[in-house]
Amino acid sequence: MEKFFYFAPMEGITGYIYRSAHSRHFRGADCYVTPFIASNQSGRLKTRDKNDILPEHNRGIRLLPQILSSRAEDFILTAKGIKEFGYEEVNLNLGCPSPTVTSKKKGAGFLLHPEELDRFLDEIFRGLDMEISIKTRLGWSDPEEFFELVEIFNRYPVKELIIHPRVRMDFYKNKPNLAVFEKGASKSRSVICYNGDLFTAEDIRGFCNQFPQIGRLMIGRGLLRDPALLEKAEEGNKAVDPIRYRDFIQDVCEGYREVIPGDKNVLFKMKELWGYLIDLFPGQEKAAKKIRKAKSLSEYESVVEELFADL
């Protein structure tokens, strides 16, 4: 079965600057998902969110906007605002485990209230002429909660159910519960996409061998650690020329410089990205420390240039 790969969102990192650079330098991502857009009562998109989904900022990219909400009327207004930019599908985030999100009954916090979630879904599917997919966890604290959730999801024409097989209380600890994932997926009427702990080419191939019936996968942290991960999975872990990584990193940095005022703000964004990328370069612990301690963008660029010269 031919696979379809999503690049999962990471708040603060995978905005349009990063996405555009990634799509220029690496192959394999069929669709990118936006960091969540928090709905509001006005339905107006924040300038940041609007910039992130503008078609001119995402040329050549298939993009799926994701909405975080627990109020149906707000979700509908926000989705309609997104539709004005030409999008025909939105994704509902029921997976975010952050306490600042879940305390507002949003993200994975909504899973604690299945009856309210049922009413919410009824309203948004009746109120929108758009396709709606859902990204969810197995539940709040007990994986068995997922079977009730699947029954709820099955009442609606969910285009795709993206499953991260952990409960909210796991956050990102413990291993994905593949047994509950498999059983729940078999009961779902929706197309299933898997998300969780696919960090290496071997992880991807191993999952595909174990679940050949699952044709869609979403990968986040694995791609942040290695932007060429999907190419390696397709090509048997073939080595990637370090120059490609260097050019990609420079591309992201230049993109930030064009839109973010102040070198210190750009430096902060690049340090955040290198928190994932440094794993690509074993033996470069000294360079990693220098990047973390860099006090200026020029100092940072010198360290990165030295790192790639060593390679």
Image: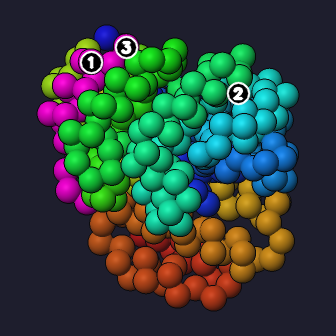
Q: Name the one closer to the observer, 110 or 81.
A: 110
Q: Position of residue 242 (x, y in %)?
A: 45, 53
Q: Which amino acid does the dot numbered 1 rest on?
A: Lys
**Residue 28 left/right relative to 52:** left
Residue drawn at the location 30% of the way across and 59% of the way down: 169
Q: Position of residue 191 (x, y in %)?
A: 41, 17
Q: Which amino acid does the dot numbered 3 rest on?
A: Arg
Q: Is residue 174 magenta?
A: yes
Q: Residues within 10 Å of mark 3 (few under 14, many from 20)?
A: some
Earlier residue among tags 2 and 3: 2
Q: Is residue 213 above or below residue 114?
A: above
Residue numbers of the magenta segment = 173-189
Q: Is residue 177 magenta?
A: yes
Earlier residue among tags 2 and 1: 2
Please indicate, yes or no, whether residue 252 appears anywhere in the rendered image. yes
Q: Name the one closer to the observer, 7 or 154.
A: 154
Q: Is disc 1 placed on a helix, strand or loop?
A: helix
Report the disc number at residue 60. 2
| Residue 76 lies in quadrant | top right
3D distance between C-alphas at marks 2 and 1: 35 Å
Residue drawn at the location 19% of the way across and 25% of the way down: 183
Report the disc number at residue 189. 3
Report the disc number at residue 187. 1
Q: Name the one closer to the observer, 63 or 77.
A: 77
